[in-house]
Amino acid sequence: MSSSSEEIDPAELQCKEEQCHQEAKKRIWEATERKAQKEEEKWKQAEEEVCKKAEEEENKRKAEEERRRVQSQQAEKRKKAPGGMVVRQQEPEQPEAGPSLAMQTLVKVYVKGRAARQGDLDSGIRVEEPEREGSGSRTKTDPKGKAKEVDEDDDMEVAGEKEDDRDEDEDADVDADGEVESLV
């Protein structure tokens, strides 16, 4: 049934299997080599970047040292020159932060505004407050948020206020306008 042309020689079959096996090994080896080369290129690039950054840092450090050296030489020359004065370059001061700076700013604004209201500024700008005439009674909100009736004809006293409360207010600093001064 089988012809001689269809017969497979076991030696030839083994040779073909060997050849396929060798080709597979070769492809695996080539792929491994390509992967190793890519990995090596990545390492080289990383090393180059690190070297470049190190060089830049070194150059910056050297430039700073050179600048300081030149400044110190110039300062020495100024010292030796008759009438020379040493001027050292200072770093700009950082403004203070925190509540003290905010409070200082508020106090300055208050003082300037008060001076403007009193006409004490030399700027020529005067702020005049309108004079109030007694119009009877009106409502005024107290610190607790409740509205109280105020009688403007009775020196701006709160209706129903006790006389004892006024004695405590007399101890506070009062300026010419009758405003209580407090710079807390």
Image: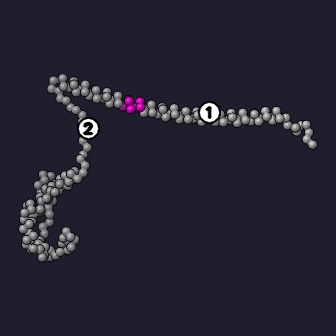
Of marks 1 and 2, which one's residue comes earlier in the chain?
Answer: 1
Instruction: Kindly state the secondary structure of the residue where label 1 is placed.
Output: helix
Residue 127's place in the image compared with 71, above or below, is below
Q: Position of residue 14 (x, y in %)?
A: 79, 34
Looking at the image, which is closer to me, 74 or 31? 31
Q: Position of residue 58 (x, y in %)?
A: 38, 30
Q: Which residue range is magenta in the image? A: 54-60
Q: Position of residue 36 (x, y in %)?
A: 58, 34
Label 1 sits on residue: 33
Residue 139 is covered by the magenta coloring: no
The residue lying at 24 percent from left, 34 percent from top is 89
Is 83 left, or right, of 14 in this rendering? left
Looking at the rendered structure, the kind of residue marked 1 is Glu
Say if residue 124 shows up in the picture: no
The residue lying at 85 percent from left, 37 percent from top is 8
Q: Mark 1 near mark 2, Cβ–Cβ under 8 Å?
A: no
Q: Nearer the viewer, mark 1 or mark 2?
A: 1
Q: Position of residue 20 (x, y in %)?
A: 74, 36
Label 2 sits on residue: 91
Alpha-carbon span between mark 1 and mark 2: 56 Å
